[in-house]
Image (tube, rainbow, N blue to C red):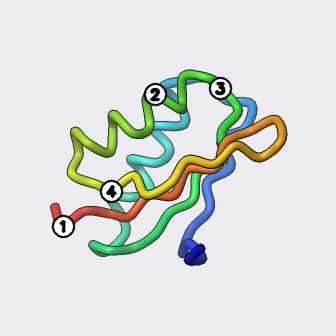
């Protein structure tokens, strides 16, 4: 899988904090940049893809890795 430009470690944070961290980082990146978000809150599996759809970003992957999830997001054009 493609290596992300930025990794956000949101493990230990409850939603909406993983989404808010991702939003802040994505706003500072150029379109097409890749961001990896690590989260262990069960709601992140719903909230991060929903945020991406609403904000125009591409939620490329969701992978379970042990006790947490790995989300890969590509920043949208907006």
Query: Within 10 angstroms of label 3, few (less than 14), some, or many (20 or more) residues?
Result: many
Q: Where is residue 63 in the image (x, y as percent from the top left)?
A: 63, 48
Residue at the far left in the pictured view: 78
Q: Nearer the viewer, mark 4 or mark 3?
A: 4
Quarter of the image for the N terminus: give it. Answer: bottom right
Structural distance between the alpha carbons of marks 2 and 4 = 14 Å
* Residue at x 26% of width, y 42% of height: 53
Above or below: residue 66 compared with residue 76: above
Q: Nearer the viewer, residue 64 or 73?
A: 64
Say left or right for 17 vs 59: right
Residue at the far right in the pictured view: 66
Q: Which of marks 4 and 3 is nearer the N terminus?
A: 3
On the image, numbered disc 4 is attached to which residue? 58
* Residue at x 33% of width, y 63% of height: 75
Structural distance between the alpha carbons of marks 3 and 1 = 28 Å
Q: Which mark is residue 46?
A: 2
- Secondary structure of residue under mark 4: strand
Q: Which of marks 3 and 2 is in front?
A: 2
Q: Which mark is residue 41?
A: 3
Query: Within 10 angstroms of label 1, few (less than 14), some, or many (20 or more) residues?
Result: few
């Amino acid at each position: 899988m493609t290596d992300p430009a930025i990794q956000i470690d949101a493990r230990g944070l409850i939603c909406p904090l993983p989404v808010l961290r991702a939003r802040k980082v994505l706003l500072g990146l150029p379109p097409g940049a890749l961001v990896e978000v690590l989260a262990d809150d069960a709601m992140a599996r719903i909230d991060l893809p929903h945020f991406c759809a609403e904000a125009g970003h591409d939620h490329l992957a969701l992978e379970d890795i042990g006790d947490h999830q790995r989300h890969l997001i590509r920043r949208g054009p907006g």
